[in-house]
Amino acid sequence: METLTQVLSSISSFVWGPVILALLLGTGVYLMLGLFFLPIRQIPAAFSLLWRGRVSNESEAGEISPFNALMTSLAATIGTGNIAGVATAIFLGGPGAIFWMWLTALVGMATKYAEAVLAVNYREVDANGAYVGGPMYYIKNGLGKHWQWLGFLFSLFGALAAFGIGNTIQANSVADALTSTLGVPAWQTGLVMAIVVYAVLVGGIKRIGHVASRLVPLMGVAYVVGAGMIIIQHLGSVPIALQLIVTDAFTGTAAAGGFAGAGVMAAIRFGVARGVFSNEAGLGTAPIAHAAAKTNNPVRQGKIAMLGTFIDTIIICTMTALVIILTGSWTSGETGASLSAHAFSVGLPGYGEYVVSFGLAIFALTTLLGWSYYGERCAEYILGVGVIRWYRIVWVLAIPVGAVMDLNFLWLLADVLNGLMAIPNLVALLLLSPIVFKLSKKP
């Protein structure tokens, strides 16, 4: 295991090195400029579209409402990335890592907008009569047969990456949180989550979308209220915390308390990596959900899709980071979900850690549901619709296994697979960007 960990660490250093980081951020910047900052300009309009999209237009093609498509996407993104991922980024890269998470999110709005536009524009209907789409389909239908190998690579990495970012890490983080707060054995947590996930998965994307549309808004609001209470208590220190985030992004962070210190490159690397892990902009996963939306307008769904990045990182991740910094917990030596739980317990004595534990449990559950859909669609692209049933079985069995595995190894594996998954998608976005710009100019 130690040798494998060292190998993965070397691969991770390359995957999340300067070249890939430049490709990830560069693609977002290029799309943002090419769209003349449309994602930022259209935020108010996008929220209006989202509200109207709660009800499906039966005259338009698709399987679930535009609202449920975003909730399914958010179900997959709002999870351990917002609670454990933010904490890990601060632990490894210092407060400055949050600045790079913000930057990743802002340009990521353009990336996610483009992904959804292409997903709806190039989607197909599979052998089961379901609407399917995502990077593998806009690569195949947009770039042609000479690029199908790129779609295959995305699907392969996606089907495997799902078991890291969307399955085992989620189960492990919940098990860790419930063990530390309630003393529940990890294997029991994993078993219960596996049973619940299986009960939902048998209903397919429509049931996943229905469950997500109920749980995501409920837990999102509850978590934001809890974090908001702590931030209000330390309102006078918020400007100082924000200044710390910005200055440390360019100067590095000195060692303090249980924090070992981090340089600028560590802040960039872990800020961007955890930012991508949290909002998934550039990975190519969200468009798989948005391709199922009942809409005939790719641009309209693109505007709704980009809100996922805004809500996930700019709002929820920022609030988690402020709680960790304002309470002084970032120098405690804790990391992952335990650091977030420590911060909330300091800010809300007596019940703060339960906000994190139960919030993490619900967030992780919805992430398990959303990512199962992503993974099975990737597997279907390679092996056909017959693989879906077997993929779901393996998916459910992996949950209790992940609950008892080593967390550091799981995070390392997820980082590697996320990076490998993003590369084919980013290449496709750059090559198909003229189509995105053309569609966006239509009235």
Image (cartoon, helix red, strand yellow):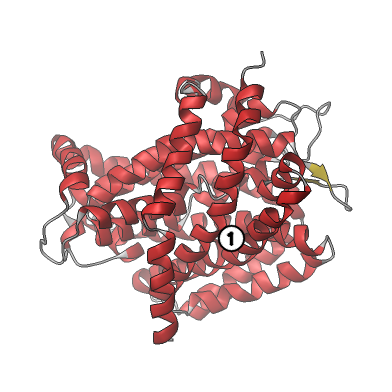
Closest to the observer, 66 or 235: 66
Tell me which residue sits at (26%, 55%) in the image: 265
Q: Quadrant of the N terminus?
A: bottom left
How many numbered circles are shown? 1
What residue sits 50% from the left and 49% below the top? 280
Q: Position of residue 230 (x, y in %)?
A: 25, 44
Q: Residue drawn at (22%, 55%), measured in percent from left and top?
A: 94
Task: Report which quarter residue 191 is drawn in.
Answer: bottom right
Q: Nearer the viewer, residue 411 or 401?
A: 411
Mark 1 lies on residue:
368
Q: Position of residue 164 (x, y in %)?
A: 53, 67
Q: Is residue 33 toward the left or the right of residue 368 in the image? A: left
Residue 407: in sight, yes or no?
no
For badge 1, the amino acid type reads: Leu
Q: In the rendering, at what x and y percent does residue 65 appear? A: 71, 35
The furthest residue to the top: 443
Q: Residue at 75% across / 38% down in the picture? A: 122
Quarter location, residue 410: bottom left
Q: Is residue 400 visible?
A: yes
Whether residue 398 sits left or right of residue 108 in the image: it is right
149 in relation to 294, above or below: below
Q: Residue furthest front?
A: 146
Q: Secondary structure beneath disc 1?
A: helix
Q: Quadrant of the C terminus?
A: top right
> Residue 436: x, y in percent?
62, 29
* Label 1, residues with CA under 10 Å away: few <14, some 14-19, many ≥20: many
Q: Is residue 114 above or below residue 318?
A: above
